Image: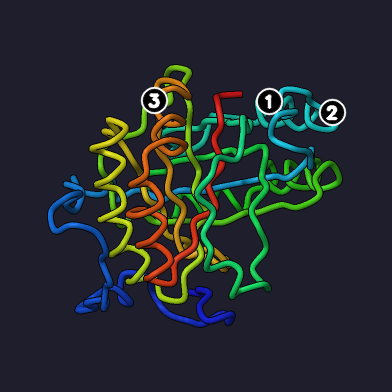
Amino acid sequence: MLHYTHGRVYAGSIMDDLTNTKPDLKVSGAENQFPKVRLVAPTGHTFVILALEIDHRPPLFAFWESRAKKQAIQALKAFSTDLAGLVDLSIFKAVLAPPGRGEYLKQRLEIPIARYDLVMLLELETTAAAQTLQSSTAWQTLLADLKPLALNTLELQASNPRQIGPVDHTRQGIFLFNFFYADDLAQNLGIWEYTAGWFVKQTGLDNSCLMAPETDSIYTVINHCRWDSLWHILPSILFKPSFKSYVTANFNANKTAPIPILYKLA
């Protein structure tokens, strides 16, 4: 199994990496001001993420879709949902890139900034089901149809090491995919539990599925969650001083860089 750290791909199992690992966290802010988030048991499922950068333009123009993006959305929606072991398949298109991108990226200039404006997320019961999907002719045909339309493509398989609660894909809302880069996976997971506590307290967040790539990826984890509308999240990150003094400060102190993008169901 391949993972990315310190600018290099290395071999090993994610769960093995986390066993008996206690990260040296540097938590800033008043003690217990934003305690660690309360977690529920992970799903035990395997996720497949297909993310595409098609329309490379400022977030305020995300509502305007090129012909290529419309073709990609149509292809994703036409993809068969008659898959063995499939729990959920959802398609998302970007709304905007909010504030909060990690300052640590300035020290890691080789890390590409995630600008994916279209994402398909599949949840499958087992790793075997995910592997069968990705090796299928239908999946390879889909990739072949989509790649000429995209500037950049991300395809990965992921486990679910942390969960606040299930993410509801049955109704429209504002969905976050936060593409994290960190030098150390355990450090990334550890400080995420504290910063997630801020989002629970300040935005009413009650769901989140954290996904850790199990195949080659430059990103250490990808956080996925949902709010009912932009107004449940934007005012907090724009106007509450503790977003910078606590959330971004703790990510920076722990050499962890989030790259957040907000989406809606396509």
Disc 1 residue type? Ala
Q: Residue at x 60, y 40 (%)?
A: 97
Q: What residue is shown with label 2?
A: 66
Q: In the image, is residue 252 above or below residue 76?
A: below
Q: In the image, is residue 1 above or below residue 188?
A: below
Element under disc 3: helix
Q: Mark 1: few, some, or many residues within 10 Å (few <14, many ≥20)?
A: few
Give the mark count.
3
Q: What residue is shown with label 3?
A: 232
Callout 3–callout 1 Cβ contact below 8 Å: no
Side of 141 where 181 appears, left or right: left
Disc 2 residue type? Ser
Q: Nearer the viewer, mark 2 or mark 3?
A: 3
Q: Residue at x 34, y 71 (%)?
A: 187
Estimate the spatial distance between the alpha carbons at disc 3 and disc 1, rounded to whole Å. 32 Å
Q: Mark 2: few, some, or many residues within 10 Å (few <14, many ≥20)?
A: few
Q: Residue at x 81, y 41 (%)?
A: 145
Q: Is residue 131 visible from the viewing direction of this image?
A: no
Q: Is residue 30 visible from the viewing direction of this image?
A: yes
Side of 122 where 85 appears, left or right: left
Element under disc 2: loop
Estimate the spatial distance between the alpha carbons at disc 1 and disc 2, rounded to whole Å. 19 Å
In terms of image quadrants, where is residue 95? top right
What mark, if any, has residue 119 been given in the picture? none
* Image location of residue 23, percent across then percent down: 26, 76
Q: In the image, is residue 265 above or below residue 243?
A: above
Element under disc 1: helix
Disc 3 residue type? His
What mark, if any, has residue 78 been given in the picture? 1
